[in-house]
Amino acid sequence: MKAVLWSAAWCVGVLACSAPPKAKTIGPADPPAAALATAQRVASGELPSVARWRAHLTDELMPFWMTPDALGSPVGNFPTFRCNDGTAFRPAAPCPELAEAGGWIKQELGRDYTRMKSRQAFVYGVAYHVTGEEPYLAAAAAGVTWLRQHAYERDTGSAVSYWENGKPQPPAPQRTAQDLAYAQLGLAFYYYLTRDPEVLADLVRLEQYMMKAYWDPAPPPAGASSAGSCPTAERQGRASDKSWCRSSIRSTHTCCCWRRCSKILRSPRPGSATCSCSRA
């Protein structure tokens, strides 16, 4: 992934450094809309061609990601760490760039991260999306299958963040929403490509777990009781105002607001589907 990111950054840098367009100087008092309206865009003729973008992907990026070491053992169990020459990290004989890496990297070398496997599956999916070449889709499918079999937990509904000494870590309540979001990345793009219903079911299960485990309602606002009743303004009938409903739901998350506003906005309440507050 580092190679992809650095290469992408290099491409952006080349574009940014070649004949930069002259733009009007925007004063500090000018609103953002004015800045956007007056900024000049790079002419379409100055952008790389579709053929050049495709060649960049197939000739310059993907060779690093299509080696046996990159594809993992078994294929789909993508390694978290690889050396600059593309070979997998081997603790018994580490390459210098990893053996001499900074402390924050060294302490991670014994871990195998779900987020890295999921990102790599995403890369293969994008490569297939650009080229239509089946080996990329096969690599994405292998990564998705491995994640579904090993990272996605059927008992908790969560997903493993990393393995250390072969053991999944940390316990489900200690995992971050960011790690779980990355666990969905490769599967989500694969579903976009294939519409595989089983992959969608796993994505939905993890999303539901996240909304249940990580949803943190705000305290009741002024005018609402601790039991979660609606603000005074809503009891006076302002729930018919869509803009008020949107701002109230974002700021209060009280059950009563959802009961009154959800029909107007046609959106379900995130998290638990049940509400225990009074219908004031």
Image (cartoon, rainbow, N blue to C red):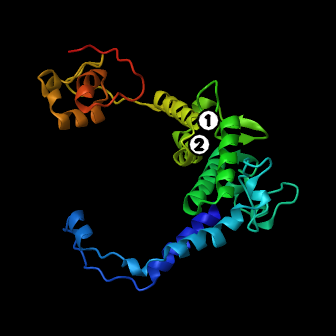
Question: What number is the disc on residue 170?
Answer: none
Q: Residue furthest right?
A: 92
Of residues 68 and 54, the one nearer the viewer is 54
Q: Quadrant of the C terminus?
A: top left
Going from N to C along the chain, the mark reached first, 2 or 1, is 1
Question: What number is the disc on residue 183?
Answer: 2
Residue 230 lies, in percent from the top left, at 22, 22
Question: Looking at the rendering, which quadrant does residue 246 occupy?
Answer: top left
Asked whether residue 172 is in view, the answer is: yes
152 on left or right of 130: right
Q: For the image shown, how many numbered marks are present on the structure?
A: 2
Residue 26 lies, in percent from the top left, at 24, 74
The residue located at (59%, 72%) in the rendering is 56
Q: CA distance from mark 2 to mark 1?
A: 7 Å
Q: How many residues crowd mark 1 within 10 Å: few (<14), some (14–19), many (20+)?
A: many
| Residue denoted by label 1 | 159
Residue 123 lies, in percent from the top left, at 60, 57
Of residues 169 and 52, the one nearer the viewer is 52
Label 2 amino acid? Answer: Ala
Question: Looking at the rendering, which quadrant does residue 237 occupy?
Answer: top left
Q: Is residue 50 above or below residue 179?
A: below
Judged from the image, the secondary structure of the residue bearing numbered disc 1 is: loop
Q: Residue furthest bottom?
A: 19
Judged from the image, the secondary structure of the residue bearing numbered disc 2 is: helix
Q: Is residue 95 above or below residue 196?
A: below
Q: Is residue 106 above or below residue 191?
A: below
129 on left or right of 73: left
Label 1 amino acid? Answer: Ala
Of residues 60 and 8, the one nearer the viewer is 60
Q: Is residue 88 above or below residue 18?
A: above
The residue located at (76%, 68%) in the rendering is 85
State if disc 1 and disc 2 touch (CB < 8 Å): yes
